[in-house]
Amino acid sequence: MIFSYDQRPVRVVFAPGALNHLPTELATLGAHRAFVVSTQRQATRPPSLDRLLGSRLAGTFDRAVEHVPVAVVDAALVAVRAANADVCVAIGGGSPIGLGKAIARATDLPLVAVPTTYSGSEMTSIWGVTDDTGKRTGRDARVAPRLVIYDPDLTLSLPPGVSAASGMNAMAHAVEAMYAANPSPASLAIAEESVRLLAANLPSLLENPNDDEARSGALAGAHLAGCSLDLAAMGLHHRLCHVLGGTFGLPHARTHAAVLPHVVAFNAPAAPHAMRRLGNALGNADPADALFALAKSLGVAVPLSALGLREADIDRAAQQATATPYPNPRPYTRDDVRSILQGAI
Ligand code: NAD
């Protein structure tokens, strides 16, 4: 066995009502002026946050959107600098957390994340921004949140469709960690438990979005998915989804949900050991089938055409996905990617 990985220092607080601990936790970090980033559409910044922070609230920016466009980063940076903040607090899904990372990268401000979806971004040092040339991503320890506050109560307002798609996004991190090119005993154990928690709890959420236990279980699964994404290199699935989101504007989480079973079916023959482990966690000896069935039951097994991909885009998407390939258990050609997309469209 040969392995190596970096373990970053991060404080994680997980409890119903944990948002109330934010002021104390910020004080422990030595932070006094918080700049809060959120999304506008669903008002992910609860009014209680402003009350909790009181005079520690230095400024806000509520225009985070998916894929972190550079124009939005530039606008946020103007506001951050005017606020003279000493910490950035991102509350909401992967979009505000992604913007928080871009702010941390540009300013060296410490980042605090309060995730309210299952993106897992809060546990990674992976940043991404999108400009005219597509989506660029990288790893940088400066963008990794120093403090993560998980409050499952904040996820109770997540619409079922967002829970389902976001949960499958988390699932994709854990699945790709299982056949990653740089596995470690830690990444494998974390990924397996993540798959188990997500598969066990996502269906219950669809039946009852207010199921506290399922909310906690799914959020804990997403936490581990983020940890596995941080420890392991991602493969073809993540490469393809970055291209589909960054170049063709497909919605991030729903694209992950739609593509994952197709890529797992492609990779299965080349990763028998990982498939056995994945099968154990999913309770089905055929992981691709199990993921198709799970996505279908959650209502997110939709064709990519329904998410905005056109037949005419397939060739360019396949070309981009193979131009800078990610390590993958089964080597892939442009024709392979084309046929995966043909099957998923
Ligand atoms: P998102 O942050 O855009 O949230 C999805 C929707 O849910 C939004 O409309 C949002 O307003 C709403 N929402 C969030 N919390 C809510 C709540 N508590 N109640 C009601 N509505 C709520 O989407 P996402 O899927 O969480 O994140 C996608 C983004 O994250 C993409 O840009 C993706 O690239 C990035 N991402 C990054 C990483 C990483 O490690 N860097 C990992 C995963 C995803």
Image (spheres, rainbow, N blue to C red):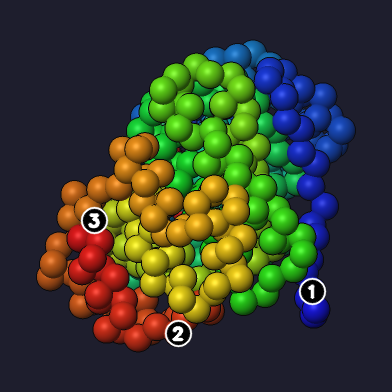
Q: Which residue is mark 3?
A: 304
Q: Which residue is mark 2?
A: 331
Q: Indicate whether 219 appears above or below 258.
A: above
Mark 3, secondary structure of its residue: helix
Label 1 or label 2, whichever lies nearer to me, is 2
Image quarter of the C terminus = bottom left
Q: Mark 3: which amino acid?
A: Leu
Task: Give the Cα separation between the discs numbered 1 and 2.
Answer: 23 Å
Tell me residue 144's x, y (percent): 68, 53
Residue nearest the observer in this picture, 242 or 52:
242
Task: Give the Cα separation between the discs numbered 3 and 2.
Answer: 23 Å
Question: Left or right: where does residue 278 sit relative to residue 19?
Answer: left
Q: Earlier in the sequence, mark 3 or mark 2?
A: 3
Tell me residue 276's x, y (percent): 58, 63
Q: Indicate whether 169 appears above or below 297.
A: below
Question: Left or right: where does residue 253 sit relative to residue 112?
Answer: left
Question: Left or right: where does residue 48 sit relative to residue 345?
Answer: right
Image label count: 3
Residue density around tag 2, few if under 14, some if 14–19, many if 20 or more, within 10 Å = few
Q: Mark 2: which amino acid?
A: Pro
Tell me residue 118's x, y (percent): 53, 40
**Would you say the beta carbon of the disc 3 residue lies within 8 angstroms of ligand 1?**
no
Residue density around tag 1, few if under 14, some if 14–19, many if 20 or more, within 10 Å = few
Question: Left or right: where does residue 7 sit relative to residue 132?
Answer: right
Image quarter of the N terminus = bottom right
Mark 2, secondary structure of its residue: loop
Residue at horizontal 19 percent and vertical 49 percent from the top: 306
